[in-house]
Image: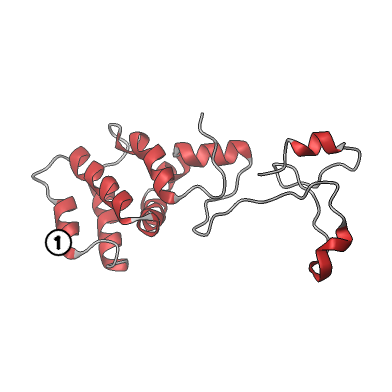
Amino acid sequence: MMLYRSYQSYCHRLQHDMYFLTSTSRLNEQVVDKIVLQLNRVYPQILTNEEAEKFRNPKASLHTRFSDLLKHLQKKGDRHCQEFYRALQINAEQLFNDLPSRKILTETGGRPFSAQGGCRVIPHPSLNPSELGKSGPILPQNFRGAPVPADWTSRQLEGNALI
């Protein structure tokens, strides 16, 4: 199982969700058209008119068009993938909630992905708070974001140094 952290990009998330999204009967023609139109009309910088026509062309199979759309968005970058997730949530909320990446986030207590990303650094317990200057104390946290119990030894904290 792949673990997600807040710094994972929307492109990586889409790559992980791609099989689930393209498997048979998850999305119908109408929902795919709505997603393509939203990406084209609401966010014309995401899909141009020409690209939208390509992904709505009924001569190609729905599976092929949708797979091509997902690959296209991944090539364009993280913002494009993020807007796809937004369009999916608006037009197919139940499917959005059933995505493998959403389930992993829910099960692990993770946070939704952020465009900025980043990871949280937990200071070593031997850090002298007076060395922090005016920034104030940094409290150690465990991997779920809760404060670390006061009775933990430094050896227990070392395993959770980077989250």
Q: Looking at numbered disc 1 in the image, what kind of residue is underneath it?
A: Glu
Residue nearest the viewer, comparing 138 with 61: 138
Farthest left residue? Answer: 59
Residue 129: image location, x then y, percent: 87, 58
Residue position for label 1: 50
Tell me if 82 is positioned left or right of 142 in this view: left
Residue 77: image location, x then y, percent: 35, 55
Name the quarter where the C terminus is drawn: top right
Relative vertical location of residue 70 with respect to residue 108 in this rendering, above or below = below
| Quadrant assignment, res 24 | top left
| Quadrant assignment, res 154 | top right
Residue 155: image location, x then y, percent: 82, 34
Q: How is the image coloured?
A: secondary structure
* Residue at 19% across, 44% down: 65
Farthest bottom residue? Answer: 134
Farthest right residue? Answer: 151
Q: What element carries label 1?
A: helix
* Residue at 40% across, 42% down: 95
Tell me if 5 is positioned left or right of 83 in this view: right
Few, some or many C-alpha atoms within 10 Å of disc 1 (few <14, some 14-19, many ≥20)? few
* Residue at 21% across, 38% down: 63
Q: How many labels does the image show?
A: 1
Residue 74: image location, x then y, percent: 32, 49
